[in-house]
Amino acid sequence: MTDRNTQAEIIRQSLKRRYRKERRFRAYGILAIAIALSALVVLFVDIIGKGHTAFIKTTVTLEVDIDPEMMYLDDATDERQLRMADFVEPLVQALLREVPGATEANRDAVRDLLNPYASNQLRDALKENPELLGTTQTMTFLTHTNVDVYVKHAGDEDYSIKLSDRQQAWVDQLLDKGVIETSFNDVLFSRGDSRDPSRAGILGAIVGSLLTMFVTLILSFPIGVAAAIYLEEFAPQNRFTDFIEVNINNLAAVPSIIFGLLGLAVFINLFGMPRSVPLVGGLVLTLMTLPTIIISSRAAIKSVPPSIREAAEGIGASKMQVVLHHVLPLALPGMLTGSIIGMAQALGETAPLLLIGMVAFIVDVPDGFLDSATVLPVQVFLWAGSPELAFIERASAAIMVLLAFLISMNALAIWLRKRLERRW
Amino acid sequence: MSTMNTLKPAVDKEVGASRDTVVPAHEERPESAVIEEAKTVGKPFSDDPKFKLRNVEVFYGQDRAIKNISLDIARNEVIAFIGPSGCGKSTFLRCLNRMNDSIDICRVRGSLLLDDQNIYDSKRDVVELRARVGMVFQKPNPFPKSIYDNVAYGPRIHGLANRKSDLDDIVENSLRKAGLWDEAKDRLDATATGMSGGQQQRLCIARAIAISPEVILMDEPCSALDPIATAKVEELIAEMSESYTIVIVTHSMQQAARVSHRTAYFHLGHLVEVNETNKVFTAPEHELTESYITGRFG
């Protein structure tokens, strides 16, 4: 009896210890998650805090008197006259009329409120509609980047305001009058890169990313899945296949910049492919993504229960039928998930693309696989390295767009897995 | 004869090292019980054999899992393989339709004839063999597809039905034979994995008979089922025995006694005794068989 009591006491004591241990481990776990989450929160707060202003553009709306004499332009259909004509003067005059207390003597200071490319906009409008010559039109132009920075960041110590005190006073007055306005920055999503921050957009980078991803996907998914099926279902188990397996795992661990060097040496120098093009970028990223896809596809194939295989073999299905009818449908969700995660990695990859020249300054939106392009993360890299603070906020905006792409890709992976997963 | 050497010491040593679960059996084994290799007690041979198996040996790497077994399986008989765990009865069963092929380290020796044709002939097409020798597994393993597709899969891949109506007939007949038609006819499009374990196993039987095999191998078909489902499957076996040769591996001696015409007792890779079922259970000739069926080990 006493023996039993002491034994129960020992167990009670040890129980206390065990529960304490359990509580401690739970606390460690919660702590770890809290640290990870807070890092994430800091990241998001920082990026959104810095980048949200990039989604706002500052514009000025003017009553432009398109006077032929002022512009030295008689005929807006004449290319040669269009090249020679003065498109700045009507804008300056229109702005002078709006700015209270400004005279002809201030014309340079007033002109500097306008975006340097505003005159190009007027020329393009005239080129399209020559009949506008001689009329008065209400037109909206981007302001100078300095005005943009002042409107969005006045009083912010991080930003240096490059407007004179008088210019600042004018901008304040024009804001009150509603001549200068802020609105959603559609320029960011409709243009390529530019030297002028307020005219710089990420459309070029987005299209470049999509083209590159397309090449990566159509090459790496079929090759990766085929390799995984062969290795898992058909290849004999011997030293050679072991060697291949080890090396696939090694490839997955190779730093991505090495793949960039390989792409430079092989695709560009050996095969003579052009630099900076999505095709080569896609090829390089394919090399980088393949091991990930092969490894995850093999894991997916391995997780197909052997009983299904046996069932099919037992009624006389051939090897190929077992694979195509039973193994592949069951392994597909896992393969897709792995591939999408591999693609998401590739989408965020910068280093290998720097080496094949996708880091060039490219203004035009690429229109093909052989057109010079850059990609989103490289665009971020370019803008983040820029000395102009107006580019830094755009880099943050580009990061947000990139993250949105990545998050939606991962969400797609989860959705696909949930949808296609079959239980047995 | 030199092949008839007495193996007892060697067996003890070899098996004691690798198969712990059987060790207590040796302790209770009667002193006089001696297994002689390739010397099966009873009536292992038949006048009208479907399978003619001679000197069959199976190796897993260095491990000899089946030791020189000779046996005939008669046309349209139900033969039960019984024996303690790890005695090789499942391994032996899986040789009959070459399901062991997918195991790399497994090698089969000896002569295995199905209707006087060598099963392990290198020119033999394993797909054709399995179309003739169907198999039902221990755990119900329906495909994660509809009930209809499960049964129709075999006829489809072998091209047995050219028209949809033919396929419908095959599916209905197979489900009827498996005693599943009444339960399944209204939900042929429902997924098979939603059925109960017993229904799933009968579906697997329907799937196996949909390609009209000559032989059906059953590897402990009821071990995952409850008694009611088991009774249904056993009933089915009794009905099927009129038109099929059935080989069933079972752990349940009652089941062997209920469904089979002949019973084969395996022990540590040897075929110890084969005889008519009632004889094996009422008057076993070998002492090991007696010990096993009286429950002294197993």
Image: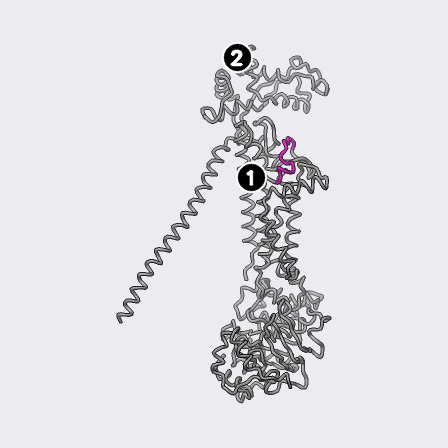
Asked if the stretch drawn in magenta spans residue A234, the answer is no
Q: Name the dominant secondary structure of the magenta segment.
A: loop
> Residue B92 at what x, y percent from top left?
61, 76
Residue linked to disc 1:
A402
Q: Which residues are magenta?
A: A352-364
Q: Which mark is residue A1?
A: none
At mark 2, the secondary structure is loop
Q: Quadrant of residue A93?
A: top right
Image side of residue A135 versus residue A171, left or right: right
Q: How far apart are the two marked residues, 2 and 1, measured between alpha carbons?
A: 44 Å
Of label 2 and label 1, which has the lower sequence position? 2
B1 is higher (above) or lower (below) than A346: below
In the rendered image, is residue B16 in sight?
Answer: yes
Q: Do callouts 2 and 1 point to residues on the same chain?
A: yes
In depth, the one of A66 and A411 nearer the eye is A411
- Identify residue type, mark 1: Leu
Residue linked to disc 2:
A102
Q: Quadrant of residue B215?
A: bottom right
- Identify residue type, mark 2: Ala
At 52% across and 68% down in the image, what residue appears?
Answer: B196
